[in-house]
Image (cartoon, rainbow, N blue to C red):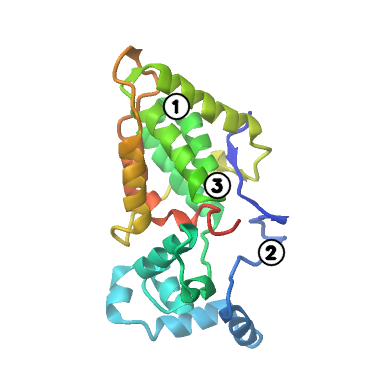
Amino acid sequence: MTLKAVVNFKGEKACHHSEELRRRPVRGDEREALAEVLITKLPRSLHLEKIAKLDENIMESGCRDQSLSHNFCGFSLQEMLSRYFTVVTGQAKKEALDMPILHRCLSHIMKNAKDLCKKHAPEHYRLAMHVFGYMTQAETLVELDGIVTSAAIVFSSSHSGDNVEKHFQSLQMLMSRAGQCAVDVTTMDEEDYRNDVGPTPFQQHFEVIIERADLDKKGENNVYFCPTFIPTLLKYFLPQVALWSGILLG
């Protein structure tokens, strides 16, 4: 079994290859307006023009996603993620449904995931990387909740009982169903990751999911116990999960 990850979009395969370009998903009325502008301007040129008009506080934050959210959606990254949360939970108003959907390149987020797993689950690096890969493929919040719950029980239980066994088998089933992957993380370089946006509805949602996970506290010692893996995932990755999973793309 190879240590790779892939995101599957309905209708086509997502490719990150210099010779096969695919447009990223942008929805709503702004798509046509943006297409008209891009007839005469390169995306980089348009992006730089909009950066010049940004508020100084946004520029000083140094956050690329913050800049993109202002340029393409017209508001802060935190506000954008809050609206995305209303979409995936079925509470969205019309303005949220019409906004563009920004999504990170899978290869970039997997570089960060590689660093996360090497530092916080070194003895179970392959399993942790596969779990993160499953998260990128989740198409609904409910599906993602299940993966996070299983991961929390397997990696955060100090002892091994019925729950660890049950949820480890759930992760194994996901692994067996995963097809050949498109991104080979074994050749990627590490890079720093950080959460520049502060608390988001996604972070608050997964705090509850993880807190409710029924951890095993009796029995033999859990060989998969990695006490810092899930807290680090929650702090640095799950707050912006809509930008790197498939929950807005299905």
Q: Which mark's residue is nearer the viewer, 3 or 2? A: 3
Q: What x and y, as percent, mark residue 241?
A: 44, 53
Asked whether the beta carbons under mark 3 and mark 1 sit within 8 Å of each other, the answer is no
Query: Which of the two residues, 235 or 207, is positioned nearer the viewer here?
Result: 207
- Kind of residue indicated by mark 1: His
Q: How many marks?
A: 3
Camera-near label (3 vs 1) is 3
Q: Relative to residue 43, is residue 209 depicted above or below? A: above
Report the residue at 38% width, 64% height from top.
82
The answer to whether residue 155 is left or right of residue 98 is left
Per the image, the residue denoted by label 1 is: 124
Q: Residue at x 35, y 66 (%)?
A: 78
Viewer-proximal residue among 161 and 92: 92
Amino acid type, residue under disc 2 in the picture? Leu
Q: Is residue 226 above or below residue 106?
A: above
* Mark 3 crowd level (few <14, some 14–19, many ≥20, 10 Å Cα): many
Any mark on residue 21, and which? 2
Q: Position of residue 93 (x, y in %)?
A: 46, 72
Which of the labelled discs sits on residue 138, or is there none? 3
Secondary element under disc 2, as helix, strand or loop, is loop
Cα–Cα gap, marks 2 and 1:
34 Å
Q: Residue at x 52, y 30 (%)?
A: 171
Question: Residue at point 40% right, 73% down?
Answer: 67
Q: Quadrant of residue 27?
A: bottom right
